[in-house]
Amino acid sequence: MTSATWNRPLPAGKTDDDGASGSSLDVISLGRRVRHLRKAKGMTLDDLGAAVGTVASQLSLLENGKREPKLGMLQSLAKALDVSIDQLLGSEPPSRRAALEIELERAQRGPLYQSLGLPKVRISSRLPLDVLESLVGLQSELERRLNEQVATPEEARRANGELRVMMRERNNYFPEYEQAAQKVLDSVGHTNGPLSQHVIADIAAHLGFSLHHVSDLPHSTRSVTDLKNKRIYLTQSQRSEHDPRSVLLQALGHYVLDHQTPSSYGEFLSQRVATNYFAAALLLPEKATVEFLQRAKTAKEIAVEDIRDAFAVSYETAAHRFTNLATEHLGIRTHFQKVHESGIVYKAYENDGVTFPSDHTGAIEGQPICRYWTSREVFSVPDKFSAYNQYTDTPAGTFWCTARTERSSGGLFSLSIGVPYAHVKWFRGRDTTERSKSRCPDPDCCRTPPAELASEWSGMAWPSARAHSHLLAALPPGAFPGVDETEVYSFLQAHAGD
């Protein structure tokens, strides 16, 4: 790291009071860490100022995240506080309180809080911890509710339905994306083992991109690619729910697959499927993954958690990748579900004849899954560490499914893979004694209340529904739905001189 990194001017229109938001240095975290270390040594601002050769007012600005120090000041601070530069710039907040202060300060500087027109809360040691907890919790919940997508407008539902039909016709296998991924892996000499961050950085460099981790990534994005200067911007945050490897590989996928600005919502969805597939094909290369699955099939021990562990990916990524390769290479037809704890389908795929609930457009997102299916039953299982396996007899036949639950900011979800009874012999967990019966789509299965309950309570209950106003909203405008293009362009302009 050169001194130029610390001495460069702020972007046009920015001041020190903006917290050096145009910089890649996380000044808010740095300031809270300096304050914590200073107080731990029993030093006042005047004491520390005398030790590093500056005045207390300047240190106060630094501790409040409103001034970015030069390299010489960082070295003096590290020496005075008896820590290394790396410790001073560490990514982990020094305490729970510091973490809350950092999160609240970032929130108050963000566009969402500013749009509310509320006065800023002065963050100091006198602010009670429970108040900090409440303010941060309120901000987090507000953001979650604004970002939540419970239902999809009709245009998106139709486009998604058409896309699912195409995926089913191709058995969710796309050789063109497999070949593109393998070509990239060959270019950096990666042959086996999990794909490390180091190898991924080599891939980015081979494709001509430099990587930049920033603290001010636009809120509506996971990454931003500057095609003019061949840069990819990623967040510094450690709190992301998404595998940072996948986020970067998806960004590179748009470039490798030569995507152009989408002209319709259907094209936008298709591009997203393509980049997700491309990223998975890099993390779990076709040849190595198929060999792994074939060995497991021979041993009659196929298990999604084994795929997850062998390639160091998430359970959801492993399950998706299984659907890519199971039919093409193993002759196994299958289905996948991601279901919210409320019973609503968020994602699903099938080519094995299972009957998912759907609306008149063929869309299944937002539809309730039968409460007797594995993807619903798993929520009531006490053991959250082991896979839950179950046979379900349905009008379409008997299916065996394996499922797990995972929590995210949107709540608790189940992730399940299922196969027809004829294919269960290849899977670990086939010896389960758990079994249920579903008569869905017959409404008397689980949608219509039992006659005894209906007789007792019909007309005597008035529930308050969780209605969401955005159910009535149109699709977000723009080529990239939900993305604030002005925010993105302003971000790129601010970082163009970095």
Image (cartoon, rainbow, N blue to C red):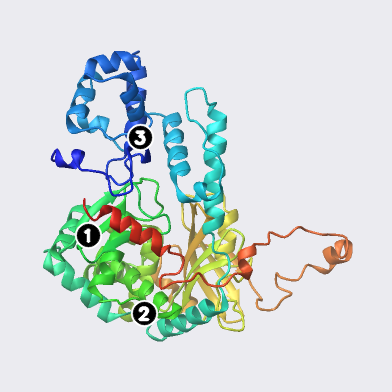
The nearer-to-camera label among 1 and 3 is 3
Helix, strand or loop at label 1? It is strand
Say whether residue 454 is left or right of residue 412. right
Image vertical order of residue 313 relative to residue 430, above or below: above
Q: Position of residue 165 (x, y in %)?
A: 46, 84
Residue 327, numbered circle: 2
According to the image, label 3 marks what residue?
66
Q: Position of residue 407 (x, y in %)?
A: 49, 52
Amino acid, disc 1: Arg
Q: Answer yes or no: is residue 284 visible.
A: no
Helix, strand or loop at label 3? It is loop
Image vertical order of residue 157 relative to residue 41, above or below: below
Q: Position of residue 401 (x, y in %)?
A: 49, 67
Image vertical order of residue 24 relative to residue 445, above or below: above
Number of other residues with Cα within 10 Å of mark 2, as a class: few under 14, some 14 to 19, many 20 or more: some
N-terminal label among 1 and 3 = 3
N-terminal label among 2 and 3 = 3
Q: Residue furthest bottom?
A: 169
- Name the residue: 36% across, 63% down: 318
Residue 424 location, quadrant: bottom left
Amino acid, disc 2: Thr
Q: Residue furthest front?
A: 13
Which quadrant of the rendered structure holds the N terminus? top left
Determine the CA span between mark 2 and mark 1: 38 Å
According to the image, label 1 marks what residue?
231
